[in-house]
Amino acid sequence: MRTLNVSISDSEYSMYGIKTNRLTFSDIVNLVNRQQFRAHLKKSVELAKECGLSEMTMEEIDAEVKAVRENAKNRR
């Protein structure tokens, strides 16, 4: 097994919620993926607000999903 040293800023250390100085590569990948997921989710929420989608009821969302699925089924 090889060892890799990585330097990060204090703000990144805090942002990723790192609690130890020793992480496996899988731990690092999971931390970065989780942070990217949060950023994408935040952007999705912002876009939904901009487009007025955040005002939709569950019934409206269900109807939209049903319509898209029906349309996809009819394209086959």
Image: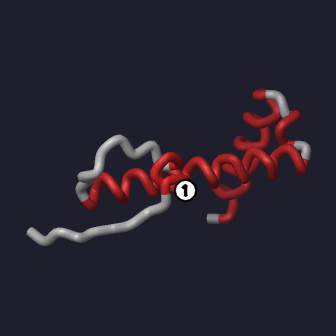
Q: Is residue 70 visible?
A: no
Query: At x 73% / y 34%, what residue is drawn?
Result: 62
Q: Is residue 33 visible?
A: yes
Q: Residue 48 or 74: which is nearer the viewer? A: 48
Q: Give left or right: position of 55 versus 8.
A: right
Q: Residue 34 or 70: which is nearer the viewer? A: 34
Q: Give left or right: position of 38 versus 7.
A: right
Query: At x 69% / y 47%, what residue is drawn?
Result: 42
For the C terminus, the image quarter is bottom right
Query: At x 55% / y 56%, what residue is drawn?
Result: 36
For the N terminus, the image quarter is bottom left
Colouring: secondary structure
Residue sitting at the far front? 10
On screen, 12 above or below 17?
below
Query: At x 35% / y 57%, what residue is drawn?
Result: 28
Name the spot of residue 2 as percent of width and height, x first: 13, 71
Name the spot of residue 38 as percent of width and height, x first: 59, 47
The amino acid marked with disc number 1 is Gln
Q: Give left or right: position of 40 versus 67.
A: left
Q: Give left or right: position of 25 versus 2.
A: right
Q: Secondary structure at mark 1?
A: helix
Name the spot of residue 41 as percent of width and height, x first: 65, 48
**Could you classify mark 1 by the number of other residues whose Cα lies within 10 Å: few (under 14), some (14-19), or many (20 or more)?**
few
